[in-house]
Image (spheres, rainbow, N blue to C red):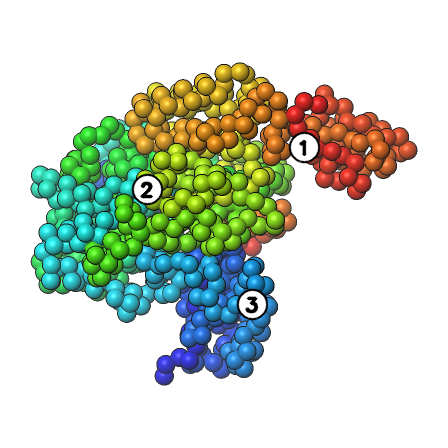
Amino acid sequence: MAQRLNVLVCSGASCLSSGSIDVKDALIEEIENNGLEEEIKIIETGCMGPCELGPVILVYPDEILYKKVKKEDVKDIVEQHFLKGRPVERLLYKSTETEKLIKKHEEIDYFKKQKKIVLRNCGMIDPESIEEYIALDGYEALGKALTEMNKEKVLKEIETSGLRGRGGAGFPTHLKWKFTKDADGDKKYVVCNADEGDPGAFMDRSVIEGDPHTVIEGMAIAAYVIGADMGYIYVRAEYPLAIERLRKAIKDAKEYGFLGENIFESGFNFDLEVRIGAGAFVCGEETALIHSIEGKRGTPRPRPPYPSVEGLWGKPTNLNNVETYANVRHIILKGGNWFSKIGTESSKGTKVFALSGDITNTGLAEVPMGTTIKELIYDIGGGAPEGKTIKAVQLGGPSGGCITHEYFDTPIDYESLTELGAMMGSGGVIAMSEDTCMVNTAKFFLDFNTFESCGKCTPCRVGLKQMYVILDRITKGEGETGDIDRLVELGENIKKTALCGLGQTAPNPVLSTIRYFRNEYRQHIEEKKCQAMVCTDLLTYYIEPDKCKACTLCAQNCPVDVIEGERGVVHEIQQEGCIKCGNCYDVCPFDAVVKTTGEF
Amino acid sequence: MKKEEILRNYEKRKDNLLYILHDFQDMNPYNYVTDDDMQLIADYLGLPYSKVYGTASFYSMISEKPRGKHIIRLCDSPPCHLMGSVDILDVLKDELGIKVGETTPDMTFTLEKTACLGVCGVAPVMMVDEEIYGNLTPKKVKKIIADYKEGKK
């Protein structure tokens, strides 16, 4: 008997951490208690996208979305909705614009404005079921490629599609495949970069955890074209769920004959293994990744030779990002022409973005290239929360740059972002409001890159550290005239001379914030002022005598005892010993403590 | 699982080094790889000890020093930082009585900072062993630590 209701429970990493397992268990129990097991099926899916609303469940066939579901809500869901057909209103999504409740998930702006190719199955299928993957055209593209198309024809479709690498650099995928295909070698490899170390990026994680077979199929098609019979997926060790799901998917694919020998009776052999990292951001760089798979320290090496010619164990290796491979099967099934009609002149297809920071709808969003930044962060992202404004977005993580609101009408594609001093990167978008200090943010990214530097080349190892020292002084109120010029000179030199992509792009956040927020730097240096009130050393707390009621609450909460006063005597903060912890500011019931910045 | 058993699971190929290091570390109640372990691995794979040590010390998730039973990794990347990971760090330092990189005297917890965990949708986030905890508040963190102390997790 076909079930009358399918209940999809999002089990992406974010919803899992918000308690989706408890919700699922409660659903199972409640459905059993009501004798509905034959009629209602529960499916655990990968990430549906809107992490901010998690735990999320989606009820089919009516496509009703429930948000922030707790296990205590399940009784109502089963009794009111499943038994009596009345959706539970308090769990429905409420539009911030119209204030109306929206039942169907496709009517919610966040979903409506997306175009899902890579994420098509995520949140829709059980990622641990190969049968569900197959039911939605799974492995049909591989079958078509192996039995109806020769290698040149497959390569031609990829070329027509205009697919460019989604790891960040945007190199034309068909060219990389061609170079590896044409390279001399008795053995060739395909490798998938699932290291995803960029802060604020969780696209690849969601694809692997939500739809692992799509990556396997893409890699198999690539292997067919280039003549490889072995592939590796390199996953960072911080993603244990992704590793587990991939391993299961590979095992199932082997059982079904989609991996192994003589796939689709075509004579093509292909095997796949998972390799794990151990906490090194630099291993996202292709040559460092290759060294890591080989069991060595993950340090990069100069290129050329490129991995296409000399990669894993010195053999020609095609290395692509998760998202790049995830696009392949759709291109083969629907044709390169279809794909090339989506996006802009130079950047075809869609891009998956991960929205985080000061934004209402954090989570994943897949949009056609050419969508403007404004549409992405306002229409889909919902803008800034609680009456704040977004002053800039950081695109491309620690390799990227910020884009200010004046440029939010820019369509997103590889070239337009590079012109603005940012980059597409892997897809992380971090929204920053007026409460963010851009100098401190730049220092933050630089700190990350300095820590993650492998140490092999001097520009990165020493240069980034020197940039950090200058930035640190600036945020501590010890900035000097000429510091901005020093940062720019150092940054530009490091970009030209560092050995690998980490060092070459590490100065970007600093250079980009200087370009658009020079005023904030100037204020920090000349006026000792942090407008966003973030840099602790540039803050001053003082008590307004007129407002002080001498209740002694501030003095009681001062960890360093620098507030003088007693009951009935107006209090005063001794600035010399003040550690700027802000406790007095937080506890004063009369708003008598003032937080300020600049010369006092 | 004994050390020899772990090694027998893997072919004598140098590219198995990271897997073997992870397994040795996971098997050790103090979550680290000892000098003896590294020598054993070196002998098995036909590598010099220095190569094994050099590789192990490169990766931040492999430790050559004893750590606590539970490793707490607080994400300190920009999205989590923007959402208040600094306050969460203060709570953790208070509750555990240790600084970043240190282990509690009873060897129960080690506190580390980590790079982005890829769950930015629910920032701020921390990972305890292999469990992710998101949307952290000081109250939640205190409860999580208490649960681990009582052996509930």
| Residue A458 visible, this angle | yes
- Residue A272, x across and y down, in percent: 22, 51
Contact (CB < 8 A) between labels 1 and 2? no
Q: Position of residue A11 (x, y in %)?
A: 44, 60
- Counting from the top left corner in percent of width and height, residue B60 is at 41, 35
Residue beneath disc 3:
A101
Q: Foreground residue, A132 or A161? A: A161
Query: Which residue does the numbered mark 1 point to in the structure image?
Result: A581
Q: Nearer the viewer, residue A301 or A356?
A: A356
**Quadrant of the image for the N terminus of chain A?**
bottom left
Number of disc labels: 3
Quarter holding residue A556: top right
For the residue pair A386 and A246, the one nearer the viewer reads as A386
Q: Is residue A202 above or below residue A331?
A: above
Front label number (1 vs 3): 3
Residue B43 vs A74, above or below: the answer is: above
Same-subunit check for callouts 1 and 2: yes
Estimate the spatial distance between the alpha carbons at disc 2 and disc 3, rounded to whole Å.
37 Å
Who comes first in sequence, dot 1 or dot 2? 2
Task: Give me the C-alpha separation between circle 1 and circle 2.
Answer: 43 Å
Name the residue beneath numbered marker 2: A414
In the drawing, what numbered circle is on residue A475? none
Reading the chain from its start, which is encountered first: label 1 or label 3? Answer: 3
Residue at image coords 84%, 33%: A546
For residue A364, side relative to residue A259 (left or right): right
Q: What kind of element bears circle 2?
A: helix
* Residue type for callout 1: Cys
Q: Are marks 1 and 3 in contact (CB under 8 Å)?
A: no
Identified at 55% across, 48% down, the residue is A384
Q: Quadrant of the C terminus of chain A?
A: top right
- Residue A277: quadrant of the picture: top left
Q: Residue at x 29, y 34 (%)?
A: A288
